């Protein structure tokens, strides 16, 4: 089971995902996060500025240019590097295929899933489904054993976990089938041309 993401890691991953659409300055990154209602990003706008600084220091983004519009303050434009692109896809891959107790990592991964090909996402979801089935089997074994030894009150947590995992598995299976059969429209190039279609 993968680790949970810190708020700092969430902002960094979001910045990398947005920069995959093209170079941008931090003001625009903040605006896109608000427009797309990425509520999982907290601490705006300061957190985005700090994230960009850290990503630049790590070589994951780089400064392209600094411009000024009239009397407005200078704005530094950044783009994602090859290392940044590789890091983003490594993180996204892990978040899509690995179940966690915390639902937030999967929520974030789904918001950026369109950055991958539908075939890749379908494959990663199939891996996630397989892992969910393994977890469900363990939970059901615990429930079966517990029913013969302890009061049901001691098993409520396991029952709850079972229901949550089963619901997630059912949804992941359905989504994977829709993607694999092309019933779910998937056009990353169209989104890159007009990212506003991701806005709610």
Image: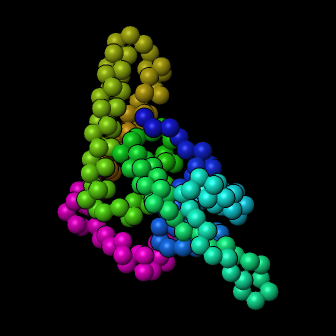
Nearest the eye: 171 or 82: 82
> Residue at (48%, 19%) from the top-left corner?
154
Q: Position of residue 103 (x, y in %)?
A: 48, 45
Q: Residue furthest bottom?
A: 70
All told, the count of numbered labels is 0
Q: Residue at x 42, y 50 (%)?
A: 90
Task: Point out the residue furthest to the top here.
Answer: 149
Residue at 30%, 32% in the rendered image: 134
Tell me if I can see residue 80 in this picture.
yes
Tell whether 160 sits left or right of 41.
Answer: left
In the rendered view, would you say 109 is above or below 77?
Answer: above
Instruction: Relative to 166, say whether 198 is above or below.
Output: below
Q: Is residue 34 above or below residue 92?
A: below
In the rendered image, the quadrant that contains the N terminus is top left
- Going by the picture, which residue comes out furthest to the left? 181
- Residue 169 x %, y %: 32, 44
In the image, which residues are magenta? Answer: 174-200
**x 58%, y 49%: residue:** 9
Does the stretch in magenta take in 6? no
Q: Nearer the viewer, residue 116 or 148?
A: 116
> Which is the main secondary structure of the residues drawn in magenta?
helix
Of residue 143 and residue 195, the one placed in the foreground of this image is: 195
Q: How far across and down, in percent of the image, does residue 55 sit?
A: 60, 56
Q: Is residue 182 magenta?
A: yes
Q: Is residue 84 left or right of 121 when viewed as pictured?
A: right
């Amino acid at each position: 089971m993968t680790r949970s993401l810190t708020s700092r890691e969430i902002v960094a991953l979001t910045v990398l995902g947005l920069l995959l659409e093209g170079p941008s300055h931090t003001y625009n990154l903040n605006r896109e996060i608000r427009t797309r209602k990425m509520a999982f990003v907290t601490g705006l706008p300061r957190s985005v500025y700090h994230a960009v600084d850290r990503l630049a220091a790590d070589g994951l983004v780089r400064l392209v240019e600094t411009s000024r519009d009239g009397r407005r303050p200078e704005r530094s434009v950044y783009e994602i590097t090859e290392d940044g692109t590789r890091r983003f896809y490594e993180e996204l891959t892990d978040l899509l295929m690995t179940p966690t107790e915390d639902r937030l990592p999967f929520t974030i991964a789904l918001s950026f899933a369109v950055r991958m090909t539908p075939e890749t996402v379908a494959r990663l979801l199939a891996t996630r489904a397989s892992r969910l089935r393994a977890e469900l089997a363990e939970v059901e074994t615990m429930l079966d054993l517990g029913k013969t030894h302890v009061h049901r009150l001691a098993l409520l947590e396991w029952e709850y976990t079972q229901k949550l995992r089963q619901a997630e598995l059912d949804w992941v299976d359905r989504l994977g089938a829709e993607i694999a059969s092309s019933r779910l429209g998937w056009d990353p190039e169209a989104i890159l041309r007009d990212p506003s279609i991701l806005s709610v």
